[in-house]
Image (cartoon, rainbow, N blue to C red):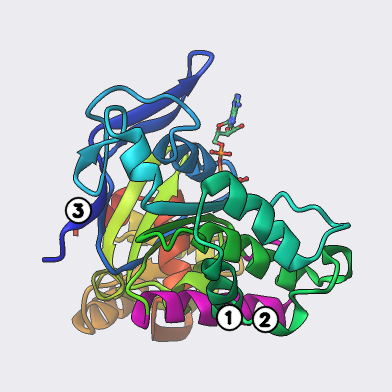
Amino acid sequence: MAPLVIETHHLSHAFRNRLVLHDLNLQVPAGSIFGFLGPNGSGKTTTIRLLLGLIRCPQNAIRLFGKDSRTHRLEILNRLGALIESPALYTHLSGRDNLEVIRLARQVDKKQIDRVLDRVQLSGDAHQKVREYSLGMRQRLGIAMALLGDPDLLILDEPTNGLDPVGIREIRELLIELSQQHGKTVFVSSHLLGEMEKIATHLAILNEGHLHFQGTMAQLQHLQSPVLSVETNDNMAAANLLQHAGYHLQESDAERLVVSISDRRQIAAINHLLLERGMSIYALQMHQQTLEDLFFTLTSHPETVENR
Ligand SMILES: Nc1ncnc2c1ncn2[C@@H]1O[C@H](COP(=O)(O)OP(=O)(O)OP(=O)(O)O)[C@@H](O)[C@H]1O
């Protein structure tokens, strides 16, 4: 297994006595594109601020590059670049001059400006004022800033927020290239599973400060179970019956009844049970859960998947 670039050990955090992160044990392997997923308010930005040392954490709770984040702060910061939501930019300056400001502050070699402009494909627009940049170009410039100093690890908080589909695709391609061709580890937060699905090698799913899943994309896909849509003359009565028989209902209302099943034999058993109780069955349709469904289940009924 690749060495871990980020590790958190029982990391918790409270704002004024309100616990917003609970016992987080993250493990981010070197070279991964690690999607840190969760709905709004689940604690992603708080985790990222803790990782970056913008919020103080207890000693031994966070290790970056195998070193404790409290005792090796400078050494760690030299190896990472970050972008939290939108970059702070001087819009009256050109893209190149914005990079120059950061370069001077970080005391990085001047040659790096051309290198990072090229990497984010802004070389041709480098002399244009940032106020003329699209939102997508501004985000790419923000990533270029994070790349100054040639960091091994990039930490990006919702980098595609507010972008149109073209901007989202550009960022997606850039992150894949940074990982695959330049060997960076990319830790990227998002509330959109569909977006992460296209690029992440690993995922963690956070909800209300609790980690509900962590692993590779393949491991997440393995959790996808088949479901059965059931349509009867009385879906509410059918739902009661199935629940009493021990089935897990993913959705149940008068319109829609969706039951988790483990194999096809359960379809026959459900059919039998409903007929036995005199119900009319209009449809039984098996389909594979999508990752979107699984994400919804993990963040709303985690107990149903956690122990599989
Ligand atoms: N400075 C703060 N003071 C008090 N509460 C805070 C503070 N920052 C965040 N919170 C609370 O902590 C919880 C987690 O917020 P956080 O911003 O980390 O979530 P998030 O997953 O990044 O959400 P979003 O996608 O909306 O940015 C929320 O309930 C939020 O209201």
The numbered dot on residue 118 is 1
Q: Quadrant of ligand 1?
A: top right
Residue farthest to the left, as pictured: 1
Crowding around mark 2 (Cα neighbors within 10 Å: few <14, some 14 to 19, many 20+) is: some
Q: Earlier in the sequence, mark 1 or mark 2?
A: 1
Is there a contact, CB below 8 Å, between mark 1 and mark 2? yes
User: Label 2, on which residue?
Assistant: 123
Dividing the picture into quadrants, the one containing residue 92 is bottom right
Q: CA distance from mark 3 to mark 2?
A: 50 Å
Foreground of the two, 258 or 190? 190
Q: Which residues are magenta?
A: 160-181
Foreground of the two, 20 or 108? 108
User: Label 3, on which residue?
Assistant: 307
Label 1, ligand 1: CB separation under 8 Å: no
Q: Magenta residues: mostly which secondary structure?
A: helix
The numbered dot on residue 127 is none
